[in-house]
Amino acid sequence: MTTVFITLLCIPSFVGASVCVTYTMWSIAPSASCGPFRQLKTMIQAGKRWVEELERVNPNLSVLARAHSYLVEHPFSCLSEPASFSSKRERLVNNLQNLSVGDRERMLRGMPLSLGVKSELRQEASQQERQTQSTRQIPCCSRLKYYIIIAARHGWYSWLSFLHSLQLWQVALKRVSGRFGTGVLSYFIFLKTLLFFNLFLFLVTGAFLVLPQVVHPPDPPPKNLLFTGLELLSGAGYFTDTVMYYGYYCNYTLHSTCKDHEAYIISTANETRLECPSKLSYNMPLAYFFTIGASFFITCIILVMSKSFGQSFRIDKSHSILAMKVFCSWDFKVSKKTSVELMSENICTQIKELLAEVNHKMKKKKALEVLWRATVHGLAWAICIASTVGCAFGIYFFSEYMHKNLERESRSITKEKPIVVEASMLALPVVVSVINLLVPGLFNAAAWMEDYDSPSFRTYVAISRNLMLKMSVLGVLCYHWLGRVAKSPELIGLQCWETFVGQEFYRFLIIDFIFTLLDTLFGEFLWRLGVLFTPILPAVQIIKLFLLFYIKKGSVMMNCQAPRKPYRVSQMTTVFITLLCIPSFVGASVCVTYTMWSIAPSASCGPFRQLKTMIQAGKRWVEELERVNPNLRHLSNNHLLPQSVVDGQRKIINLLQEQIQNEGDDKKWLITRLQSIHEQRRTPARKLTRLKLLMEQLLLWKNWTSSSLEVTRNKPGD
Amino acid sequence: MGTTASQLGKELLSEYQELTFLTKQEILLAHKRFTELLTKDEKDIPNVRIPMERILTLPELKSNPFRKRICLVFSTSEQKDGSLTFEDFLDLLSAFSDSATLEIKSHYAFRIFDFDDDGTLDFNDLQTLVNCLTGETDETRLTPEEMSQLINNILEESDIDKDGTVNLSEFQHVISRSPDFVSSFKIVL
């Protein structure tokens, strides 16, 4: 019991706490009149000042940071200038020696030298280090420590190489990228990321929820219905009373069965009972609650901290478009000859267009043309919004009709065959999937009418319209499940509304897969919300993603040509992750929070039966802990919000952007000043003027350094 | 440091792992592909050097317009003929790998685009670069007026010290503003 609780406590609270502490140290200004960081702009300045102090004391350390940039500027100066070669090389080896092994490796890796040279440098650095170290005896306990550290590093590297060896779909991805480029590849990489995500969360729910329940089935054994093929589609029937659904899970603490010879008898004043010496007990409602909460929290952290999200949005809209186009646009991954030719053609067209744009800078658009384009855009958006609203209402009324049907069915005396009832439940998912399939076609027609200039802008508009449709459909469905079914389940003869809702999710997931292969986002939302009611749903989603990858790949290879107008890749991955994060995750967490907070669980099934709301399970446990240890009371008053992480990061990004811009401007200004001074110097001048110029130069340097320090010092406080 | 063509020793493997950005699997795959390019006689020679023509038969490089420059840049041969040893090959893959830093990639990109190897990108280098990008066919080539206009614009945008050439720092300054560069400057075996 204690092990499980400590694990469940560690993941959310530790991660959340460390995130908050980091944000506090990085961004929040400490009080000016108390504490160890008073008078500093941020707490992290304490560390930075110490590093600066070290660099002042030992100038070699600051050389380290510049050593690698020196080598970047003069890559072969070490080897091609024999006179200064040995001294520079010696200096480099000295610097390498002063670093720890890990830092040394990282620095060597980052140097643009050949492997032979790097290996020699490494040998020289470690030889000299060994010489200085051999003079002092390493005591045996620190030798043991080194062995342990070395063993740990070996273990870590082998775990990393194991992870890399699970190269899922490596060959397939290579073929796609060779033919279509990095843009199309980003979609498939997105699928792969989703798969691993689902796998990880399935392991979490499987280990903490499914496994204990499978090992200890609930006490009154459930009645077993016959298995017919329809269960795979409808999720009801045989699957109803299994670990698939919420209703199967117990609401009491599971105990391990103990053998008779191990048990001992405890007799107290009131009773005698058998006690097992090994008390392995597992509080199922608490585990259910915490596992769902922890999986959401971990998802949030992973999404916020994900690399693609961070590398996202372009900083400045560029003064150097042509230079960037020429230097950065060649995609080295493309290997098929026809694709390479196509890419060359594209680049040529783009360069010509950009040149034309640069030449005719101000293209004065006639007022009439602007008005016409505005009307067309307005009309297209009106069509899209009208169709979305129409579909939402359609689903609302259709779901109400289905609901009324079920009510009538439960009240009537002559019951229909259960298989007919189950088949009719498939109607709503089919209708929703048909809408998801057909309406985006209408959006495409509207976009064709609008005739956008840039393909990426057209893609974003299409994505946002689709998103609008999906979100409104999902909103209506959530209302139907949480607002209608959950409020009064007895009207449709349900004992366990959570299992019913779980089955609905299962049906939607399966039908959605059959109908629309593009709807990964829809599936993701369903899965995230559905995991509360159907813990095994991630497994279904995994199978679906797996099949989706192969089907999509086949379709792309057979049907598509390389794109005529190439996409900007960095934004694609960001857009995908953003779409995953904001609507599906946030929407799903809102729904789950609402369900846990307000809706009353069924009285006769599931791990939260007999409680007023699901969140009471957690509250009761906290009260239990507080009773045992009164010190914990004040801990429960701190609420950790993941929102603060996002705010902190946004603030940091803004500050860094400003800093980069300022540094760029300063650099340019300084270089022009130096240039003008050099030009003045070239003209014959008297010594006094030259001296004056040098003094001026020195003053400029001083002003520049002090002003930039001023700027950076003032910034974090704003 | 020698590499026998048949097997890669454990020590060597870990050294390569530590000094390059490649994982163990990538190094082993690179070794396999490299030995496939060797003739029967060459398989026993340590530190064997494969001539450029054979390297260029690799499907990843075959259609790349910069293939010759890539071989010349990563070659450590004294004759500057573009022949690669296994370690040069690993250097190549490391610079083009997923985990290589922006500094390394931009450094090698600069050297690849520097067709005359003088340490700066002058007018002729840029002209050759644009011709490589736009392809060999006549339809896709730029006219001389467009070419000179393009190169003047590039120099205006990126040449900060106004010496008529783009040096490494200026090149890296331009590259650092583009988030696409890191994802497009990749070759995976």
Image (cartoon, rainbow, N blue to C red):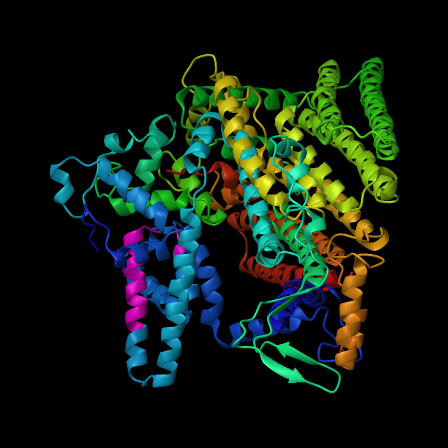
Reply yes or no: does residue A290 show up in magenta: no
Q: Which residue is drawn at 36% across and 31% down?
A: B60
Judge left or right: residue A677 versus residue A144. Answer: right
Q: Can residue A80 be seen in this view?
A: no
**Above or below, A706 relative to A316:** below
Q: Which residue is drawn at 41% across and 24% down?
A: A336
Query: Which one is in front, A221 or A453?
Result: A221
Residue A672: give x, y in percent of width and height: 60, 47
Judge left or right: residue B7 versus residue A652. Answer: left
Query: Which one is in front, A211 or A542?
Result: A211
Image quadrant in which you'd find residue A144: bottom left
What's the magenta region? A109-128
**Above or below, B40 relative to A77:** above
Reply yes or no: does residue A114 show up in magenta: yes
Q: Can residue B140 be seen in this view?
A: yes
**What main secondary structure does the magenta stretch of the protein show?**
helix
Residue A45: give x, y in percent of width and height: 66, 70
Image quarter (top left, top right, bottom left or bottom right) of the C terminus of chain A: bottom right
Residue A129: give x, y in percent of width and height: 32, 74
